[in-house]
Amino acid sequence: MPISCSICDGKAILKRPKTGDALCKECFYYAFEEEIHKTIIDAKLFTSGETVAIGASGGKDSTVLAYTMKELNQRYNYGLDLVLLSVDEGITGYRDDSLETVKRNQIQYDLPLKIVSYEDLYGWSMDSIVKQIGLKNNCTFCGVFRRQALDRGAMMMKVDKIVTGHNADDIAETVIMNVLRGDIGRLRRCTAITTGTDGALPRCKPFKYTYEKEIVMYAYFKKLDYFSTECIYSPNAYRGFARAYIKDVEKIRPSAIIDIIHSGESLSVKKDVRLPVQGTCERCGYMSSNPVCKACVLLEGLNRGLPRLGIGKTHKERRKADEAEKAKKAAENLNSEDQKSCDNSSDQSNNRTCVSSCQCSTDISKLTLNSKPDVSKLDF
Ligand SMILES: Nc1ncnc2c1ncn2[C@@H]1O[C@H](COP(=O)(O)OP(=O)(O)OP(=O)(O)O)[C@@H](O)[C@H]1O
């Protein structure tokens, strides 16, 4: 016997993951969109007249976000100017394909689009970063650079706010990850629906209470054009564990995702816990709780051939980097001393052994090529 829709009595075609209600397609769309509208209104996310950039990756979350933002803006007269903003991380075979989807979305939803790239902003694409650092830890670079790239792109577009497609599952995972890491500063901030109000551009998450499964269902039934391949460099192992853990708990307790978010929201931090103080990076001026922001540290590491600088315990990596730098300088000094003492050598290009009065018998080819340590190959 067909199951009837619990709202309109029509034929139900799905069971809502969030509530367990049997619904027809139209009633599901309505319930899904109204919940997002309620989230936007309750949290007073926008003010009429604002320009809002939708972080558009071409994936399911941001595609559904662009679609519903456009829909609700019209239906409820939010008075927003919506634009699409994409970051091209430079991942061949992944982001280039997903950006093609965003370009089609731009036409389908009739919204302006801006694309900013890591290559232009930092001089490094993720393809070239992965060549340096390998697959492990590359997500750290990508996450830190993307955050700043979105802000920079949004500033270029002169928007008032950014919205991203972070959903309830993403937020619950982040709560668990921060608990496991003991990162109290982030734990306190990660459930906020709007962040960045203290300097950078405000960033909002209208899908804060929206389940990923429902986003997928919505995109599927609405036949939205989105890109569904996982990042080729992806395995963000730590998030993967948090995700698997929540999925397991959800089987026993279906409300686990929302419960974790509520726990995060209700958390209060003891007065004597030292929290990072927000300042600005002395190099690039971006907000940072350290004198130099994470993006600048990572970039410095890449540019100095020390890609692990900024990964893990920064002070340890910095000490090693400084030691390597000292060793390099010492080797350079030694090299120039040797070169000086060899100034009266015979034709160095033909006769590669020092034949000067210093009688050092140094093989000049080895001196010039090998006495400078290749710091990128030093094993940290
Ligand atoms: N390259 C990008 N350009 C613009 N915005 C991005 C980009 N990558 C991520 N975002 C924004 O951050 C949100 C969360 O990104 P995340 O990497 O967790 O992707 P996701 O959960 O796969 O989302 P999506 O399905 O939208 O790709 C996205 O929904 C999007 O709004």
Image: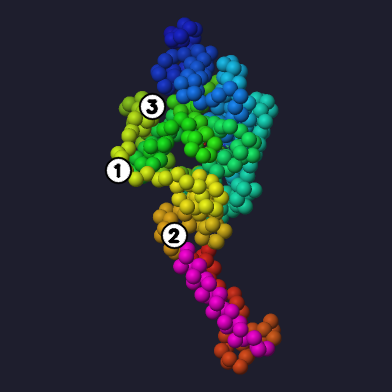
Horizontally, is 330 left or right of 340 in the view? left
Between marks 3 and 2 in the image, the one whose residue lies nearer the viewer: 2
Three-letter residue code for mark 1: Asp
Q: What is the x, y in percent for residue 52?
A: 59, 29
What's the magenta region?
A: 321-346
Three-letter residue code for mark 3: Ile
**Color theme of the render:** rainbow
Asked if one can make out residue 158 in the rendered structure from this viewpoint, the answer is yes
Q: Are marks 3 and 2 in contact (CB under 8 Å)?
A: no
Residue indicated by mark 2: 317
Q: Quadrant of the N terminus?
A: top left
Which quarter of the figure has residue 276? top left
Residue located farthest toward the top when viewing the structure as drawn: 9
| Cα separation between marks 3 and 1 | 29 Å
Q: Work out whether residue 250 or residue 287 is closer to the camera in this orientation and state it.
A: 287
Q: Secondary structure at mark 3?
A: helix
Q: Earlier in the sequence, mark 1 or mark 2?
A: 1
Q: What is the x, y in percent for residue 193?
A: 46, 30
Q: Earlier in the sequence, mark 3 or mark 2?
A: 3
Which quarter of the figure has residue 15? top left
Residue indicated by mark 1: 272
Q: Residue at x 41, y 33 (%)?
A: 191
